[in-house]
Amino acid sequence: MQNFLHDMGLFREQCLINGAWRGADSGKVLRVDNPADGSLLGQAPDCGAAETRQAVEAAQAAFPAWKARTPQERGALLRAWGQAIEDNLEDLARLLTLEEGKPLAEARGEIRQGASYFPWYAEEIRRCAGEVTPVFRAGVQALTRREPVGVAAAITPWNFPMSMLPRKVAPALAAGCTMVVKPASATPYSALALAELAQRVGLPAGVLNVLTGGARAIGGEITANPLVRKLSFTGSTAVGKELAAQCGPTLKRLSMELGGNAPFIVFADADLERAVPTALACKFRNAGQTCICANRFLVERSAYEAFAQGLLAKVRALRVGNGLDPHTDMGPLINADAVAHTDALVRDALDKGAQLLAGGKPHSLGGNFYEPTLLTGLTPQMRIFREEIFGPVAALMPFDAEEEAVALANDTEYGLASYVCTNNMPRIWRLFRDLQYGMAGVNDAALAAAETPFGGTKNSGLGREGGREGLLEYMETRYLLLGGLEG
Ligand code: NAP
């Protein structure tokens, strides 16, 4: 493909280590395909442990000078980087759609949200003060100050490559950490384009290093290297647990943004005119490949039929196609495995008695496209009730009482996002108390924002990204005791 971006300088097929663009030591590369048509988009270096070590050492060398800059100085660079992302929105959106498949409008939204973390954390670090503790003994005074943890590593997934990275990098760099980042192999170009923009605005060498390549080799070095003081991972629960275990011997701080199994609970008192489009966006955004996608729709029996019919009309109207086409509402899944996984969950549900209202099979467009699917008659015995779908399948089940809905919602190992559609205020408070989830959206499903703490409980992870909490994940609290002050 020739000149598919206005500025082809944003399309980087090399890694960034210590301010230099380069390939793998071995010269090996990974192939990166466009999920919409399977065509070769480009290649990326297949780096391993040796390059990772170099990147970690570069980050360690850059750490003292970066930490020594004032928050305002670091913040000014972060603001410039965020602005550069905004200024290159159209090219970045095209690149994101080409490597990930989502429609251009969604790509733009993701990039804008990613960019918003930079000004937010540029400001937030200026407010990140320590404390003077109330005197607890005569003649002493205690103080705390917050300091960056040191070299931080990030491993990110393919589904939101333009927002996951800023969500980690902006707070880490604002705090004064330096970073080593490994994006998903399916979508390396978003991270490399963001790194190119960081270079252009003058981020010093070694402050941000981006490596592509074998997950186990890079992850193995990141987790074993004692210079890395923090790992922030977003991805599947299985890999997150493996990485957490690998970090044990060097006892790193961990942030783990893992899988979800979100309940979407619709009460009969809800405004269905609002609940149906909210459900549609919550389920079918990014073709259902979102960790906070609704996974199980629990609908009060008296509203069940009306909600199902309302959602069915919207699901049938979804236009499936190449994300570059401005008329497309839903793009392809990321790869053939994702199509097979989605289809296996649908088959299992149908075998166990679910009814098919729409879709239910790979799309006639072929390749990685799957039909937007609506099932009713979901039961806890179906895999779809227990497992993260990560595909465009909405499954509905009825309930009769609020306590029953809460029990069904909590009947999962996960605890990331939950959604409730109701206009009953006391009920909202009860559910916020009783739903065992890190996040709850009431009559709204757009949870992620720079200002808010995103994250889960149970097997959905550790720590929070966004908001004040997102910054503290990259900071250590140090305590100073001043004695001999009796006089
Ligand atoms: P994944 O297979 O866990 O991969 C995520 C990242 O980890 C990729 O960069 C991958 O590299 C890397 N990786 C895989 N195995 C590794 C290993 N053994 N050691 C070190 N790194 C390893 O997950 P995914 O399929 O990309 O993403 C989907 C999952 O992410 C879903 O479960 C979803 O819920 C979750 N997710 C969670 C959030 C959240 O905020 N909670 C947000 C988005 C996604 P390669 O690409 O090179 O394999």
Image: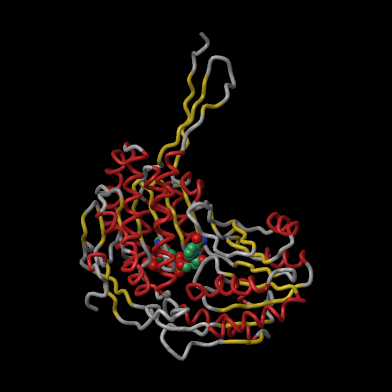
In the figure, residue 191 lies in which quadrant? bottom left
Residue at (69, 72) in percent of width and height = 298
Q: Residue 407: where, in percent of width, then height?
A: 73, 64
Q: Is residue 156 above or below residue 288?
A: above
Q: Where does ligand 1 appear, by image quarter?
A: bottom left
Residue at (57, 80) in percent of width and height = 345
Q: In the depicted view, which residue is nearer to us: 48 or 102?
A: 102
Q: For this view, does 229 lie left or right of residue 360?
A: left
Residue at (30, 44) in percent of width and height = 60
Q: Residue 463: where, in percent of width, then height?
A: 52, 51
Question: Which quadrant holds the N terminus?
Answer: bottom left
Q: Is residue 38 above or below residue 56?
A: below
Q: Residue 178: where, in percent of width, then height?
A: 34, 47
Furthest residue in direction top, as rendered = 487
Q: Is residue 387 above or below residue 342?
A: above
Q: For this view, does 87 lie left or right of residue 273?
A: left
Q: How many marks?
A: 0
Q: How is the image coloured?
A: secondary structure
Q: In the depicted view, which residue is nearer to us: 213 or 176?
A: 176
Residue at (53, 11) in percent of width and height = 486
Q: Residue 215: where, in percent of width, then height?
A: 37, 64
Furthest residue in direction right, as rendered = 401
